[in-house]
Amino acid sequence: MPTRHVIITAHNGVHARPVAELVRLVQADRRTVTLRTSAGTTVDLSSVLAVMDLALIPGDAVVLETEDGTGSDALLDTLAAVLSPLP
């Protein structure tokens, strides 16, 4: 399964705007994507509430994972960029 290890650098952590963007991207792609915290909690990235409940902040490490297939790597790269945007 394709994965991305990401350290969150999004300003103010993962609040409503980035969560909405993550969920929109996953729902548009229609494949299952999970987010796993360093504590081992795993959530479906298509659920706004599940992601918001994690209360992720800058510096938190997460792992994004999805099924293998055409476009999987591009999707994970896009999701990682939402969590850790370039300056």
Image: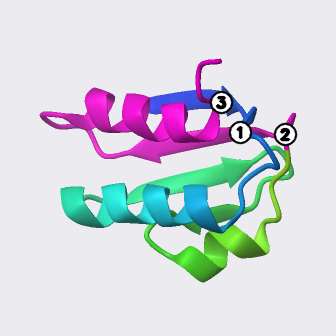
Residue displayed at 64% across by 76% down: 50
Q: Which circle's residue, 3 or 2, is located before the other in the chain?
A: 3
Check if mark 3's residue and mark 2's residue have beta carbons within 8 Å.
no
Mark 1 vs mark 3: in front: 1
Tell me: 29 left or right of 65: left
Mark 2 sits on what residue? 58
Find out whether the residues at labels 1 and 3 contact each other: C-beta distance under 8 Å: no
- Where residue 52 appears, as percent x and y from the top left, is 70, 72
SS at mark 1 in the image: loop
CA gap between label 1 and label 2 equals 6 Å
Q: Residue at the spot x=62%, y=81% of the render? A: 49
Q: CA distance from mark 3 to mark 2?
A: 11 Å
Q: Amino acid at mark 2?
A: Pro
Give the number of the mark in front: 3 or 2.
2
Q: Give the mark nearest the N terminus, 1 or 2.
A: 1
**Distance Cα–Cα, label 1 vs label 3:** 11 Å
Which residue position holds label 1? 10
Residue at 45% across / 58% down in the picture?
21
Q: Where is mark 3, residue-wise?
A: 6
Q: Position of residue 82 (x, y in %)?
A: 53, 40
Work out whether residue 10 or residue 79 is closer to the camera in this orientation and state it.
Answer: 10
Q: Residues within 10 Å of mark 1 (few under 14, many from 20)?
A: many
Q: Is residue 54 visible?
A: yes
Q: Residue at x 29, y 67 (%)?
A: 27
Percent coordinates x, y for residue 23 in the rendering: 43, 65
- Which of the image's four quarters has the N terminus? top left
**Which residue ends up furthest to the left in the rendered image?**
70
Badge 2 element: loop
Q: Are marks 1 and 2 in contact (CB under 8 Å)?
A: yes
Q: For this view, does 69 lie left or right of residue 74? A: left
Q: Which residues are magenta?
A: 58-87
